[in-house]
Image (cartoon, rainbow, N blue to C red):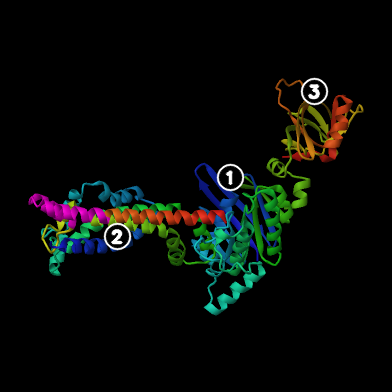
């Protein structure tokens, strides 16, 4: 069996997750800082989570397609997004981004504001407050968001097939491979991919639960002392 | 180092408008919850921005709305002790103390060690805040503030959430720690006992405004305003009307009171502290109320007797007088089963405008 969908899926999900972590944290911080249009921007950031992935894919196709302004600019630099694995990364990033953004934003909002005030009065710079105080205290949420985002990116189908297509060995991810196998009537192949996907998804859920339990135990222990 | 504050800030239908100055002393800001005392501290620290006004610390202007000066909290050099101490949970004790010290590493370690010694935190250097007791956390918070070398220290209701035994202990510790501090200390509280023990000067804040600023003895012995009387613990207040230079009518108590002092023209209320009443079984007419007991409440070491004027023509049944009396004394009075006559000694009357 050609294992390329497995490698492509992992590669795409991995890169997408890294981008999502950075963008998600930055977006969460940005939204908490702004005063105007907060609801509107939050809505735009959350939209990919509630829209059908095919609609997200359609929007991406419109943005990155050869006929769009942005697509033309990219063409000048000889960059093509559509039907490449980069397109799959973009699709997965956009779809998994809201999970990271919302999880981290929730953690930021729950963070005790007086701790930040205290840090300011002690003369600690805003940047240092962010990376030395806020980030270390919201790490559990960042990890939870990462696992969710990675699982989502790994299972991405709709937006990916719209933007990156279904080119075996290049853009065909596992989720797309299942679809292709069923379409072609290759039951055995479909079963193998379904099994692999189930194992991977289940493992990530087990991992996140394991992590949560460990965190709970840690805090419980602290509570006793 | 002196502090001058004159700020105005509108928040919904609440307006904060305070003006005061403090020298190198412990100055308390006494006020009921929600009167704007914490907001004032936050404005001084630069956490909140006033709408207009001026804040000057020594020769540095921290805030001036006219000249568009608004220093960041980082630059103000103000130590702020929060009610929950606001320690950084991810850092050890020594990291908490050292993180705000902007010195090269060697010197920073020296400062941290110095503070750890001064605040009796030896042995706790590597512990995290959640492994410390409340008292230790408070010492870390103070050590952290001192390490950042503030020019003024502000304490925001530091004992508010503590039980009375722990409160007493922490209060003693803070007093000791602050005894070496030479600058201004602003202490915000709604507890009159804390304020009395801690400070020399007291500013009473009520509804977003400074009501009175005075020496603590003067404030407690002779509060001038209704909110000062209430905040210093006066339990009996009646609205009052001036009759002559030396007599007034206490409307809620329904009695005429005589006072040796000249009664101010603008008197609005008269107050009487709950433990200042004097009992008599003789027929005295001046400043005396014949009372009916409505309720007896037992405290550990005293009784609180709720009374009302027996001769009052007013129909409502509220108890108007709260009298706090020693247990033994009350038992003696109770046995006699005679009408209770309370004397409102003229020197104890609080004349409030």
Kindly report the distance in space between the C-alpha atoms of the residues bearing marks 2 and 1: 43 Å
| Pointers 1 and 3 within a single chain | yes
Q: Quadrant of residue A207?
A: bottom left
Number of residues whose C-alpha sits closer than 10 Å to that of mark 2, classed few (under 14), some (14–19) or many (20 or more): many
Position of the C terminus of chain A by quadrant = bottom right
Q: Please state which of the two labelled residues, at mark 2 or mark 3, is closer to the viewer.
A: 2
Residue A221, position in %: x, y?
52, 56
Q: What element does badge 2 sit on?
A: helix
Quarter of the image holding residue A127? bottom left
Question: Is B77 on the left-hand or right-hand side of A164?
Answer: right
Frontmost residue, B211 versus A174 = A174
Q: Choose between B268 and B29: the one closer to the eye.
A: B29
Q: Position of residue B351 (x, y in %)?
A: 77, 39
Q: Given the image, what chain letter belongs to the residue carrying mark 2? A: A
The stretch of residues the image draws in magenta is A174-200
Answer left or right for A91 relative to B252: left
Magenta stretch: helix, strand or loop mostly: helix
Is B225 in front, or is B46? B46
- Which mark, by number, is residue B34? 1
Numbered circle sitting on residue B310: 3
Where residue B347 appears, x then y in whole percent? 84, 40
């Amino acid at each position: 069996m050609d294992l390329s969908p497995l490698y492509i899926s992992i590669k795409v999900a991995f890169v997408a997750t890294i981008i999502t972590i950075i963008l998600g944290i930055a977006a969460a911080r940005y939204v908490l800082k702004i005063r105007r249009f907060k609801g509107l921007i939050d809505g735009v950031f959350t939209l990919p989570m509630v829209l059908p992935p095919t609609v997200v894919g359609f929007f991406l196709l419109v943005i990155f397609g050869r006929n769009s302004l942005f697509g033309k600019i990219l063409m000048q630099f000889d960059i093509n997004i559509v039907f490449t694995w980069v397109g799959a990364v973009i699709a997965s990033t956009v779809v998994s981004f809201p999970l990271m953004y919302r999880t981290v934003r929730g953690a930021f909002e729950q963070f005790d504001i007086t701790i930040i005030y205290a840090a300011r009065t002690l003369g600690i710079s805003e940047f240092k407050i962010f990376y030395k105080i806020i980030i270390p205290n919201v790490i559990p949420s960042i990890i939870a968001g990462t696992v969710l985002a990675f699982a989502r990116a790994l299972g991405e189908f709709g937006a990916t097939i719209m933007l990156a297509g279904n080119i075996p060995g290049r853009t065909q991810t596992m989720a797309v491979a299942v679809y292709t196998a069923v379409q072609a009537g290759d039951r055995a192949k479909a079963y193998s991919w379904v099994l692999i996907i189930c194992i991977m998804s289940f493992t990530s859920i087990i991992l996140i639960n394991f992590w949560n339990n460990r965190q709970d135990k840690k805090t419980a222990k602290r509570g006793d002392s | 180092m002196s502090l001058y504050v004159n700020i105005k800030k509108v928040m919904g239908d609440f307006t904060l408008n305070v003006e005061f100055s403090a020298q190198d002393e412990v100055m308390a800001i006494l006020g009921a919850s929600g009167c704007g005392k914490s907001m004032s501290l936050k404005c001084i620290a630069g956490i909140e921005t006033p709408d207009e006004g001026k804040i000057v610390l020594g020769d540095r202007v921290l805030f001036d709305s006219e000249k568009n000066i608004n220093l960041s909290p980082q630059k103000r050099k103000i130590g702020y002790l929060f009610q929950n101490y606001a320690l950084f949970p991810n850092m050890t004790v020594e990291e908490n103390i050292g993180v705000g010290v902007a010195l090269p590493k060697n010197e920073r370690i020296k400062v941290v060690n110095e503070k750890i010694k001064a605040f009796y935190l030896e042995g706790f250097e590597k512990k995290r805040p959640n492994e410390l007791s409340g008292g230790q956390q408070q010492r870390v918070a103070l050590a952290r503030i001192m390490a950042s070398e503030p020019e003024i220290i502000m304490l925001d209701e530091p004992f508010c959430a503590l039980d009375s035994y722990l409160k007493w202990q922490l209060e003693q510790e803070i007093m000791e720690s602050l005894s070496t501090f030479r600058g201004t200390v602003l202490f915000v509280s709604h507890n009159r006992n804390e304020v009395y023990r801690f400070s020399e000067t007291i500013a009473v804040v009520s509804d977003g405004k400074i009501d009175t600023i005075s020496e603590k003895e003067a404030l407690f012995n002779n509060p001038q305003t209704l909110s000062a009387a209430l905040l210093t613990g006066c339990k009996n207040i009646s609205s009052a009307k001036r009759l002559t230079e030396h007599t007034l009518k206490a409307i809620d108590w329904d009695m005429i009171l005589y006072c040796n002092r000249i009664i101010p023209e603008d008197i609005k209320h008269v107050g009487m502290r709950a433990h200042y009443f004097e009992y008599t079984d003789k027929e005295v007419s001046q400043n005396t109320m014949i009372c009916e007991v409505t309720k007896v409440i037992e405290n550990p070491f005293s009784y609180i007797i709720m009374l009302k004027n027996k001769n009052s023509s007013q129909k409502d049944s509220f108890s108007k007088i709260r009298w706090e009396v020693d247990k033994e004394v009350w038992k003696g009075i109770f046995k006699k089963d005679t009408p209770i006559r309370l004397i409102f000694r003229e020197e104890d009357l609080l004349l409030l405008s």
